[in-house]
Image (tube, grey):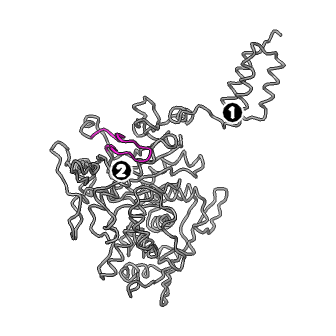
Amino acid sequence: MKLLRIHINSDYGSIKEGFKLQFRAPYEDQIHEQIDWSEFHPFCFAGLNGSGKSNVLEALSNIFYHIESCANVNQPENFQNNFKPEFCKPDAFELEYYISQDKEYKIENLVKVCITKKEKNDKKKDDGLPQMTYQPFPFDKEPIPVSVVAEKFATKPAPAKRYLPDLVIGYSSGENEILSIPFLKTRLLHFDEYRVALEKNAKYEEPESSLLYVDYEMSQAVLLANLIFQKEEVLEPLHKELGIADIIRFRMNLNLHMHENKKILEQYKKILDLFKLCATTYYEEKDKLTLDFWINPASKKAFKDNFSNNPFKLFQAFQILYTLNYRTVKPEIKSDVYQSKGFYTDGKVPTPEPQEKVFFFLDYYIKKKYPDSEEVVPLLMKNLSDGEQQFLHTMGICLMLKNKSALLLLDEPETHFNPDWRSKFIRTLKKSLDHSQSNNLMTDILITSHSPFIISDCYPDKVIAFEKGRQPINARAMNFRTYGTSVDIITENIFKNRNTIGDLARKEIEDIQTEISKKKKLSSKEVQEYKMKTNHLGDSMEKILLFAQLNELEDTDA
């Protein structure tokens, strides 16, 4: 998919009514420029804290969550009692994007989708329900309306479902809980979908919703799916940047809790049987199933044979198992979360003890090669650093996007990266998508960042500068060429910061500048004494300018 524009017509976080963001010019306005949307060019939202850049990601995740909640049909009664199609957060918006109607993703297969929602107004008898229209390529016919809200007691989703992305993926390294709220609601929904299927003895194959949040647990599943399925060239970023050579072994621990006189995993028996076919060994007890996997070429082949040679299918099997860990969440807590309109839910959903979970990994060992040594050592997955975990979160999911239309919402993914990784981040993303043969026409990636390194690898029409109280503007409209520009220049133009050193050291230099500004001339001895005062300071532009100022004041004739 490719985003076109979003207008938010009601207050939302730091975003005020009337907010407008044009992601790209309409295709019909660019037709003479021979545009190629299949090239990799992510959007980077840049600006100071509180400027609203993360709120755009939150708004998009909430909008797609709301439209799916309107269109889907497998919602439990508890959710239906708390969800109102006429109320959303943000509650008034217009969103336009392009999406393909065919798995052969070409410009000619695109349709332009427009979703609009007005605030419910009882005085004007507005129903407040979201509306959707679409226009097939070449987008020159009248928009065709599509029903968004599923019929009561319907067994198939509303037609709008067809025009939504396959995946909306969220990730926040800065613990942005508001971004995660619609994804948390979706996880609770996924559990109840499964619960209803269990109670009705109905077939259950995959979650109905497309929203997916990548956290530590999901990252474990992402890494496994990639290391087992992907070719060596696809895994090159993991080998080169993280030193992860391969997976050694892991254990799947499954607690067979009872629900309504049935074992909770009863409806998942078909998938569990596939895992047994791939396991090195497994053993069953009355209330527990344990599967051990030693990974070698034979076990990798077994996974590929039993999971259709599709890494996403294996990942989704783990995703559903993780979802079942929400079995301990009480109905009243779910109601509280479902009713949340963007406020914090931290602490409301309890974290179950291991014996209360349905599924978790044990003895998850990888082969790790350290940069200063040729030695490859076994390492527990949980012992990777925060930066390495972040790298896995963002890179890993990109490797599984083949044949998926997706929107990736990455909130400050580089927080724990070292400077080298920050400078390589965009290039590594591109290599990951290229090696996995993903079609960039299918995917839009939005990244919020404070890193000038990331901005320096993004084209100016894709760098959106945010400033509190103002409409966002892309760098091209600012006549600022971001791509390949020095990080110092980017810091000055985007973040309005001209300093190249920390404030504490800068204050020492400024104190000297203030002192000498009152003098017309300085003797050579005084100049030398002032310079000696900065001996403990390293090299910087600020120090160079101070020395230049001292040299100008030096009276060489004295």
Question: What residue is drawn where x is 40% and y is 56%?
Answer: 341
Relative side of 251 to 308, left or right:
right
Q: Earlier in the sequence, mark 2 or mark 1?
A: 2
Residue 334 rendering spot, x and y as whole percentages: 41, 68
Does the magenta stretch mainly form a helix, a strand or a loop? loop
Q: Give the secondary structure at mark 2.
A: loop
Question: Above or below — where is 288 with respect to 376?
Answer: below
In magenta segment, residue 5? yes
Q: Which residue is mark 1?
A: 506
Which residue has dot 2 on it? 90
Q: Position of residue 96 (x, y in %)?
A: 28, 46
Q: Which segment is the magenta one?
A: 4-26
Q: Amino acid at mark 2?
A: Pro
| Magenta residue check for 432 | no
Please indicate, yes or no, whether residue 115 appears anywhere in the rendered image.
no
**In front here: 492 or 72?**
72
Residue 311 % position (x, y): 41, 66
